[in-house]
Image (spheres, rainbow, N blue to C red):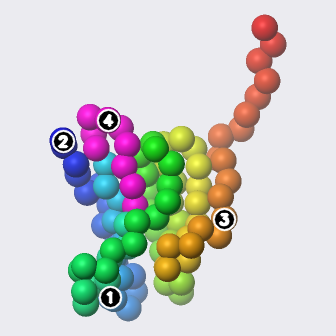
Amino acid sequence: MSWQCMSLLVRRDGHLVALETCNVLLREGDAKLVETEDAKKVITLECDQTAVRDIVFDPMGEYVATASASGMARVFEINGTRVYEESLIEKTDVAT
C-alpha cells in the first residue's frame, strides 16, 4: 500500500497534532489526532470512505474540522466526538 501523510498540523499549544493520511492508490484516507507527549494516544476521526482533503484546528484549539473528497465537512471535538456535519456539494435533481 502507498500511504502518505498529506497534511500535518500542530495545535497552538504544541500538545496535539492533527494529520490526514491518504492511500493514493485507493483514493481513501482518514484523519487522526496524536498527542505529542505520548504518540501512542491516537484518536481516529470518523470520516467517510473517501480521502480527507483538508484538516484544520479552530483558533482556540478546541475543535478540528475536516473536508473530504466526497464534499462532506465535519467538525470534531478534540476527544474525537463529531459535533457537526454538512455536505458542501449542492444536490440537484436531474430530469430523465
In the displayed structure, does residue 29 sit left or right of residue 23? right
Give the Cα separation between the discs numbered 2 and 3: 31 Å
Q: Could you tell me how far apart the alpha carbons at marks 2 and 1 are, in whole angstroms?
A: 30 Å
Residue type beneath disc 2: Met
Is residue 58 visible in the rendered structure shown here? Answer: no
Give how far across and how far down residue 72 sits, in percent. Answer: 59, 49
Label at residue 84: 3
Residue 92, picture quadrant: top right
Which of discs 3 and 1 lies nearer the camera? The answer is 3
Q: Nearer the viewer, residue 57 or 75?
A: 75
In screen coordinates, is 34 left or right of 89? left
User: Which residues, given as a range, are shown in magenta?
Assistant: 23-31
The answer to whether any part of residue 91 appears in the image is yes
Q: How crowded is mark 2: few (under 14 residues within 10 Å), some or many (20 or more)?
A: few
21 with respect to 93 (left or right): left
Q: Which of marks 2 and 3 is nearer the N terminus?
A: 2
Residue at numbered disc 1: 14
Instruction: Find numbered disc 4 in the image and state the secondary structure of the residue it sits on.
Output: loop
Q: Dot 2 corresponds to which residue?
A: 1
Residue at numbered disc 4: 26
* Residue 13 rendering spot, x and y as whole percentages: 38, 91
Q: Is mark 2 on a helix, strand or loop?
A: loop
Residue at image location 55% in from the left, 77% down from the top: 77
Q: Which amino acid does label 3 sit on?
A: Tyr
Mark 3 vs mark 1: which is more N-terminal?
1
